[in-house]
Image (tube, rainbow, N blue to C red):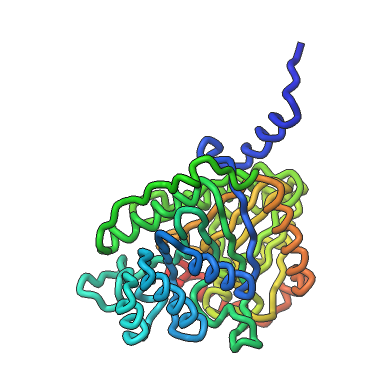
């Protein structure tokens, strides 16, 4: 006689099977998907303004523009109020950063740290290429923010003087907030920041269960596990039963990823990928275009976004598995950058990302193999040429 598992148990096993590390998934999370700067910046600033113990912000790009000044004012106000505030930014991503802008925050009590300054005394090609591409905000151990949005006007709406870049971030409450704080602390210390002890959980947080979704933090650093995020993506592709929908800003997939995309499409899975039609880094776009014909032949559907730059890095599989973070499907993320993503297992986030993808796709131009193969010889040459340098772009 075959024992039948209760529906809830069977569903839980089905959901966790999408993860390459089901044992690492932690329950009890509430995830809020944030679209563009118009939703992300107010949510982050509001969390900072409500901070009582600490604010830890890690970003790749930091600019002393309108958005940058808003964050500087919020961080400085909290520091003056006695909150521990630490700000870490990448030396290349934030270059050139205003010394006056930083000095004003330091006078208010904000601790700032530049990750691998440009032109530092320990300059090597490895140090130059290894950048901190993460975007993390942790506030009081209660909530954290992860995604693709930097601190810059590029993501602000045009009516506020921004460029209205399309991007996706998320706010997370639950156990992995502590994991993100641990990640920030490890990077801060590794980069030479003044040591600080780990923060204990507040008494009012110990018994809370914010939500129903399972989640896992996956990070790439300079101490190994360079293929961890890719391994999770390939595993989810192999588990897909219905659809795989992806937004990615800098799309130059390696051979293993291309095989996984084509294999999923060959099984009848609806594989769709939205990529920029006019990237802010044209060399990366041209290199990525070298892979389009093979993907289209394999049944993968490609969409080009021609509005303000597509900068999102999200993936949704069926109604079960989602990923939001800083990781691009290119060689720089695979081999060099410090990256972080949140893997989410559960219905609410996957449904939200599915709806968001359909809204984005409706504003895109879908590529056809026939049209793509008729592009100009010069464009073909550019794709071939820049693909040769894909590990450095």
Q: Is residue 355 left or right of residue 101?
A: right
- Image spot of residue 169 (x, y percent): 58, 64
Instruction: Give the mark count.
Output: 0
User: Which residue sits at x=45%, y=45%?
Assistant: 203
Tell whether 67 sits left or right of 299: left
Which one is nearer the viewer's eye here, 49 or 277?
Answer: 49
247 lies above or below 180: below
Direction top: furthest residue: 1
Residue 226 position within the rendered picture, expressed as x and y whole percent measured from the top left: 42, 53
Which residue lies at the image location 57% right of the left edge and 76% below the top edge? 286
Query: Quadrant location of residue 149?
Result: bottom right
The x, y position of residue 30, in whole percent, is 62, 50
* Residue at x 39%, y 58% (from the top left corner): 184
* Residue 18 versus residue 274 in the image, above or below: above
Query: What residue is drawn where x is 56% and y is 55%?
Result: 172
Nearest the eye: 367 or 314: 314
Q: Quadrant of residue 354?
A: bottom right
On the question of residue 381 being in view, the answer is no
Quadrant where the N terminus sits is top right
Vertically, is 282 above or below 40?
below
Outermost residue, left side: 121
């Amino acid at each position: 006689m075959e024992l039948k598992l209760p529906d809830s148990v069977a569903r839980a096993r089905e959901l966790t099977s999408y993860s390459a590390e089901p044992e690492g998934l932690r329950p009890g999370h509430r995830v809020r998907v944030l679209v563009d700067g118009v939703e992300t910046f107010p949510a982050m600033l509001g969390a900072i303004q409500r901070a009582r113990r600490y604010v830890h912000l890690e970003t790749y790009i930091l600019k002393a523009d309108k958005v940058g000044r808003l964050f500087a004012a919020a961080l400085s106000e909290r520091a003056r109020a006695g909150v521990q505030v630490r700000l870490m930014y990448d030396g290349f991503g934030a270059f050139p950063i205003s010394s006056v802008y930083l000095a004003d925050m330091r006078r208010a009590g904000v601790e700032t740290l530049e990750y691998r300054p440009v032109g530092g005394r320990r300059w090597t090609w490895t140090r130059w290429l290894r950048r901190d591409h993460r975007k993390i905000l942790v506030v009081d151990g209660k909530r954290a923010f992860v995604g693709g949005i930097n601190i810059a006007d590029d993501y602000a709406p045009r009516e506020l003087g921004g460029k209205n870049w399309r991007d996706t971030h998320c706010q997370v409450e639950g156990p992995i907030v502590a994991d993100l704080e641990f990640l920030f602390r490890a990077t801060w210390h590794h980069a030479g920041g003044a040591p600080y002890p780990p923060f204990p959980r507040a008494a009012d947080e110990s018994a809370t269960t914010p939500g129903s979704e399972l989640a896992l933090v996956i990070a790439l650093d300079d101490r190994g596990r360079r293929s961890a995020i890719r391994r999770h993506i390939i595993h989810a592709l192999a588990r897909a039963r219905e659809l795989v929908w992806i937004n990615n800003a800098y799309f130059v997939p390696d051979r293993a990823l291309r095989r996984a995309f084509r294999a999923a499409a060959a099984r009848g899975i609806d594989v769709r990928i939205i990529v920029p039609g006019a990237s802010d880094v044209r060399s990366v776009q041209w290199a990525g275009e070298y892979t389009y014909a093979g993907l289209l032949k394999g049944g993968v559907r490609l969409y080009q976004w021609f509005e303000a730059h597509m900068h999102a890095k999200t993936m949704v599989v069926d109604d079960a598995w989602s990923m939001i973070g800083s990781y691009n499907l290119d060689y720089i993320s695979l081999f060099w950058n410090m990256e972080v993503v949140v893997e989410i297992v559960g219905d609410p986030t996957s449904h939200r990302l599915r709806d968001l993808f359909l809204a984005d796709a409706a504003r895109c131009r879908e590529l056809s193999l026939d049209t793509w193969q008729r592009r100009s010889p010069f464009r073909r040459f550019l794709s071939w040429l820049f693909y040769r340098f894909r590990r450095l772009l």
